[in-house]
Every structure is written in structure tokens, then in C-alpha cells.
């Protein structure tokens, strides 16, 4: 996803006037991988939320501006059923609901998969206003649910929605960013600094910069502090924004109420003497800007983790006790140095005590389990935490042949504590971590997997990895040597005929031979034969088209043509020679010539009957030059026909039945 392009939209929205009504849909990736860090140490989800929240709080108020918000991956864990349908338009594209949007961005949980295609398909139904339309996707990874993003983008166009789709990439690998760039404009950023630079560059030509600095706008802010269900009348409150300057609020007339005036932005509140901190308070234009902070004493929860050794993405046990089972409570697995507001790898905590199955993070390091309760303002308060524990990289080894022949089956041996969503696959040497081409799943009851070697010769790397982790657990280099390949066939044959083709190639089922047009895409086929049957030469039905074609050997899994040679197809021709008269219900001997393709036949039928009709018939493929059929029992005028499998009559002769 592309933060700078998102910022291009922000520049457009910050303009002093909109040339026409404008509708913008923001789509935020809340997949579990958003808890990986950017190069500057910030969590991806935190960076995205900050950029979005600042924009929502400060964007201009326009009558003809409509902004909506769609989230995917925020409700269902990527390991649970329904993860690939987890997408929702949480704020419709009707006006600009700042307060609601700020609240939902703040509360969004990054726990799910990446159903990007169905999110884009749904976006086609989200726009209800005429005028300019823009979709801005914030993502840190590719589609993970098997959806077709290209088709989803095409659907927007096919349904008459001429939307400007922009992708904002958050720490995308170069290869992933390059694949996105084929689909839509993309700008990729891996640090907060680069996001700021991107914002400046993207809005340079769309924002009218005033000649003099604008007057600082201040908005009324009201804070109510509650404890044990009652207003807390004593204490002090300060709010700190992006400039790090505390803004002390004034005690209001009502007990437990403080007021002040602050510029739009995102603030952190500190309540004294309760010693509590509340983050991500969004002060925005056209919003109520009233915040309720609850400093009620929370339960003290004990958390224990019995596992002595935990590896990345491993499922492990966690036990907690001492909770009260009231309210919105969660178990969080977070880096030991992460702020208390972080909510990576989050699970609902139900009841006063429980033993839960938790999935370890995808990166090694020191972590802790936290019991959190969501306060009245949506912030998470820590009610207990475990001792720090280490998440290690699993000990994994791979064994592969040093050299293999292209497109042939290969055995890969492994030793690993197999977890859900582990995969073994190969990539070209030097490919970025996170990339894959052909892969298969290992199982705990086996120590090897079978897969086909790459179709193209060269240097490769076998990798053992998990879908939830970009960095492989193990890798092994190997070399692919070219197979001996060849095709023998006539230079010219009749269209629709059976062609004998001799071949040299590995005798494996993932390779097949077919005759196609020269301009056909890799993977195209007509009649075909796999090469694991041992037949050589083999017979293939030529297409019933004329012109320059080619015979191809194709690797099915990798969709690659590994060898080809030209062949010319001439027009189908056939002849029939039989008696001109015949007695009813008697045999008819017919000499024939023709393409003799599979499914072709000689028949007799009434004169003028549709080409698809037939009476008695004889197939001609592998038949002698003279075939025999039976005359009808009814006298009349008939004709002999040579008919192809597609019911095309290419030869006919009149015959009278007496």
C-alpha cells in the first residue's frame, strides 16, 4: 500500500476548493503482519493509524466532500474460519463523520488475513454519490485469500465506477511493490520520516499554500473523569499533542469536568493524582471533542506461561486468573519494550480465569503477555502482565539435491517442528524474503515433500517458511540444469487431423504437449497429452483452424512453455465414394478420405437434415479406408456425410434408398 499516494489524496482534499463532488474510500489493512516494524522501529499499524488519524482530525470541511472507511482483517484472526471474508465498510461514504472515523481507526485491531480482492469488489458497491471517486488502500502485503486483485480492479471499471485507485505500501518487499505497481499507482514507505517526505512531495502541486502562515485554529475540548461510577472532582489533567507540549485544562463547573481549547490533532491525556495515561484522543473539526476517562481501579490479573521454549508462530498455552470477567478484556502478546497501547496478537479474554491457546509472534525476541481492559474512551489499560519470555526461531534443516533437471520431480527432506501454514518452496536465487513461486505444505508425520523442479535452468533456493513470517526459517541453494528437449512432427498437416508427434523431454505428468496458435498465452491448450504415459510418438488432434501454429511442451504448474516448434495447418478436406442407390436396411460400403480426427464419423441422413443429425454411422479415426454402415428402413432421398466431432459436414454424396 502506498502511503505517499494516500498523501496525494490528502493533498487533493486539503485544497481550498473541490472542482466537483469528491468521494474517497480509505481501506485499511488490519492483517496480523501489520504488527511488524518499519525500519525506524515503528509498528506498521501504529504508523498507519497515526497518519490516518491526523488526516481525519485536520482535513477540511467541504459540503461536496464525502469520505468513508473500510477495514479488513480487524475482526477475525487469520487462523480462524471467516478470516477471508473479514471486510466491512465501517463508515459509509456519506459526508465526513470525523468523530466516528477517529474512534474506529483507534479501535481497529490488526489480527486478520489480507482479503484485498473481496474488499475491492465490495468497494464497487460503496460509492453512492456522483463526481470524482478515489479508493486509497493501505496495505503491507499481497492478497492472502486467493482472490484476484486484477479482476477486482477491472470490476470497478466494468460497473461504471471510474475510480482512481491508489495503493499505499507500508514496508512492502520490493518484489511485492513491483507486482502492485502493475495493478495501480503505488508509493512504498518504510519509515515515518519517509512518510512525511512523501506527504510533502505528494501534496506539492495540489495544496494552495497561503502567502502568510494561517491562524492557529483552536477547538473546545471537554474531559470528564470517572472513578467507580462517580465523577472524580479532585486532580489535574493535561493533554499533550505532537509538539510534546503539555496543555493543562481548566476545572469546569460540573464535578469531574475539565475544559480547554486545543488545535486539531491527536493527544495523550495524563490524569493526576490517579497516575493514569490515555492515548490517541482525536481532537477534530465538526466533532463533539468530549472525552470520558475512567480511572476506576482495575482487577489485578496474574498470567503464567508454562511452556519452557516457544518458537515463532507456535501455538502455546497461557493461563490467567484474578480477572473480573466484566467489560471488553483481552490477552495481548507484545514485545517487552512495546508501549502499553500496543495490541498485537490479541485474543478475547473471557471469564475470571482460563487457559488459552495463543499463537506466538512471527519474529524472534523478548515478549510479554498482557491482560488489558478497554476503558470508556477506547484505550487499553494493563491489568496484569507475565514475566518476559523469549520467542526463538525454530530449528529447521533442509536437504535438496545439489543439481536437478528442469521440470522433473524432486524430493525435499526436512527436519522441523511443523506448524500451521508452514510451507516449503523454491524461488530464484536472490529473491527477497517473503517471495515464493512453487510451494507445498509439510506435515508432521513425514520428513519429506515432493515438488517439481523449476522449468528454467539456473540458480535457485529452496526455503522453509511460514505464511505469517517474511523471513524463512531455513534455506538451501540448488542448481537446475536444462533437460534434453525435442519435437518431431510433419511441417504441414490437415486441420482437425490426428498428428503423430515424437518427443524428447522428462517423462513426467506435469509436462504436456498441445498444438496452439503462435500468439496463444503460456498455458493455453487444445487437445493435449501428458508425457508420463510412455507413448512416443503420441497422437494429438490438431485444432480445426488453418494457419501457422506451434507444437508446445508446457510445464503445467509453472505455466511455462519449455519447448516449441512450428507447424502449419491446412484446410480440412474429405471425400466420400459409395453407391448411388441401395436397398432398404442393407449394408453400404463407403470409401472415404479426410482429416480422420477423433470423433469424426461417416453417416447417412435425410437430404436437408441439420448438420448435427445422423442415422447409422461409423467412426473414422484408426478405421480402414472403407467403412460399412446400414441403410435406413424407410425409402427416400438421403445423403452420405463426413461429419467432424463438432458436427461440421465437410463432404457429402447423394444416395437413394429403395
Image (spheres, grey):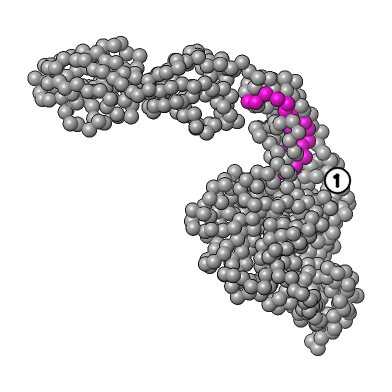
With 124 as the anchor, is 62 left or right in this view? right
| Residue at disc 1, secondary structure | strand
Q: Residue at x 73, y 35 (%)?
A: 431
**Residue under circle 1?**
365
Q: Position of residue 142 (x, y in %)?
A: 66, 46
Pointer 1: residues within 10 angstroms few (<14), some, or many (20+)?
some
Q: Residue furthest right?
A: 273
Bounds of the magenta segment: 455-475
- Quick one: 531 or 579, which is closer to the camera? 579
- At 34% from the left and 19% from the top, the residue drawn is 595
* Residue 63 location, quadrant: bottom right
Quadrant assignment for the C terminus: top left
651 or 241: nearer the viewer: 651
Q: Nearer the viewer, residue 174 or 448?
A: 174
Furthest residue to the front?
211
218 relative to 104, above or below: below
Based on the picture, tell me whether residue 268 belongs to the magenta stretch. Answer: no
Amino acid at each position: 500500500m502506498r502511503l505517499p499516494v494516500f498523501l496525494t489524496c490528502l493533498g487533493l482534499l486539503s485544497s481550498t476548493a473541490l472542482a466537483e463532488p469528491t468521494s474517497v474510500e480509505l481501506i485499511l489493512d488490519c492483517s496480523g503482519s501489520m504488527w511488524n516494524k518499519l525500519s525506524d522501529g515503528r509498528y506498521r499499524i501504529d504508523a498507519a493509524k497515526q497518519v490516518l488519524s491526523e488526516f481525519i482530525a485536520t482535513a477540511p470541511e467541504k459540503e461536496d466532500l464525502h469520505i468513508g472507511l473500510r477495514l479488513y482483517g480487524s475482526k477475525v484472526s487469520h487462523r480462524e474460519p471467516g478470516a477471508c471474508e473479514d471486510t466491512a465498510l465501517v463508515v459509509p461514504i456519506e459526508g465526513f463523520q470525523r468523530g466516528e472515523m477517529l474512534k474506529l481507526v483507534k479501535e481497529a485491531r490488526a489480527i486478520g488475513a489480507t482479503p484485498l480482492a473481496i474488499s475491492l469488489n465490495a468497494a464497487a458497491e460503496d460509492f453512492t454519490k456522483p463526481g470524482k471517486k478515489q479508493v486509497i488502500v493501505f496495505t503491507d502485503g499481497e492478497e492472502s485469500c486467493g482472490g484476484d486483485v486484477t479482476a477486482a480492479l477491472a470490476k470497478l471499471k466494468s460497473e461504471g465506477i471510474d475510480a482512481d485507485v491508489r495503493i499505499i505500501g507500508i514496508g512492502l518487499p520490493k518484489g511485492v511493490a513491483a507486482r502492485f505497481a502493475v495493478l495501480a499507482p503505488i508509493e512504498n514507505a518504510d519509515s515515518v520520516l519517509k512518510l512525511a517526505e512523501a506527504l510533502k512531495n505528494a501534496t506539492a502541486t495540489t495544496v494552495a499554500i497561503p502567502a502568510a502562515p494561517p491562524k492557529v485554529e483552536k477547538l473546545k475540548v471537554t474531559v470528564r473523569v470517572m472513578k467507580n461510577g462517580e465523577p472524580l472532582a479532585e486532580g489535574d489533567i493535561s493533554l499533550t499533542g505532537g509538539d510534546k507540549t503539555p496543555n493543562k485544562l481548566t476545572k469546569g463547573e460540573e464535578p469531574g469536568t475539565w475544559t480547554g481549547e486545543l488545535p486539531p490533532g491527536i493527544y495523550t491525556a495524563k490524569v493526576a493524582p490517579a497516575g493514569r495515561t490515555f492515548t490517541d484522543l482525536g481532537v477534530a473539526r465538526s466533532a463533539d471533542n468530549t472525552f470520558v476517562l475512567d480511572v476506576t481501579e482495575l482487577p489485578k490479573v496474574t498470567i503464567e506461561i508454562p511452556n519452557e521454549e516457544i518458537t515463532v508462530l507456535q501455538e502455546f498455552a497461557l493461563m490467567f486468573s484474578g480477572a473480573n470477567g466484566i467489560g471488553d478484556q483481552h490477552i495481548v502478546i507484545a514485545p517487552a519494550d512495546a508501549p502499553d497501547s500496543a495490541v498485537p496478537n490479541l485474543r478475547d479474554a473471557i471469564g475470571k480465569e482460563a487457559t488459552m491457546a495463543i499463537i506466538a509472534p512471527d519474529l524472534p525476541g523478548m515478549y510479554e503477555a498482557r491482560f488489558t481492559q478497554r476503558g470508556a474512551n477506547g484505550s487499553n489499560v494493563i491489568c496484569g502482565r507475565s514475566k518476559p519470555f523469549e520467542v526463538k526461531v525454530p530449528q529447521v534443516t533442509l536437504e535438496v539435491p545439489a543439481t536437478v533437471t528442469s521440470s522433473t520431480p524432486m524430493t525435499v527432506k526436512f527436519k522441523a517442528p511443523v506448524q500451521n501454514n508452514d510451507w516449503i518452496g523454491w524461488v530464484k536465487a536472490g529473491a527477497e524474503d517473503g517471495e515464493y513461486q512453487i510451494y507445498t505444505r509439510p506435515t508432521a508425520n513425514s520428513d519429506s515433500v515432493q515438488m517439481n523442479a523449476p522449468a528454467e535452468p539456473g540458480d535457485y533456493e529452496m526455503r522453509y517458511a511460514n505464511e505469517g513470517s517474511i523471513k524463512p526459517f531455513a534455506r538451501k541453494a540448488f542448481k537446475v540444469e536444462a533437460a534434453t528437449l525435442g519435437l518431431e512432427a510433419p511441417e504441414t498437416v490437415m486441420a482437425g487431423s490426428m498428428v503423430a508427434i515424437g518427443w524428447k523431454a522428462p517423462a513426467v505428468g506435469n509436462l504436456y504437449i498441445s498444438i496452439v496458435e503462435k500468439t496463444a498465452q503460456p498455458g493455453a491448450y487444445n487437445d493435449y497429452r501428458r508425457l508420463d504415459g510412455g507413448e512416443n510418438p503420441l497422437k494429438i488432434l490438431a485444432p480445426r483452424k488453418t494457419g501457422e501454429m506451434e507444437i508446445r511442451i508446457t510445464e503445467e504448474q509453472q505455466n511455462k512453455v519449455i519447448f516449441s516448434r512450428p507447424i502449419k495447418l491446412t484446410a480440412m478436406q474429405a471425400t466420400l465414394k459409395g453407391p448411388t442407390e441401395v436397398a432398404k436396411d442393407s449394408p453400404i460400403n463407403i470409401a472415404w478420405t479426410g482429416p480422420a480426427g477423433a470423433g469424426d464419423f461417416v453417416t447417412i441422413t435425410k437430404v436437408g437434415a441439420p448438420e448435427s443429425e445422423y442415422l447409422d454411422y461409423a467412426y473414422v479415426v484408426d478405421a480402414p479406408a472403407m467403412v460399412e454402415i446400414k441403410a435406413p428402413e424407410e425409402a427416400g432421398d438421403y445423403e452420405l456425410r463426413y461429419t467432424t466431432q463438432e458436427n461440421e459436414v465437410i463432404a457429402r454424396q447423394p444416395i437413394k434408398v429403395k
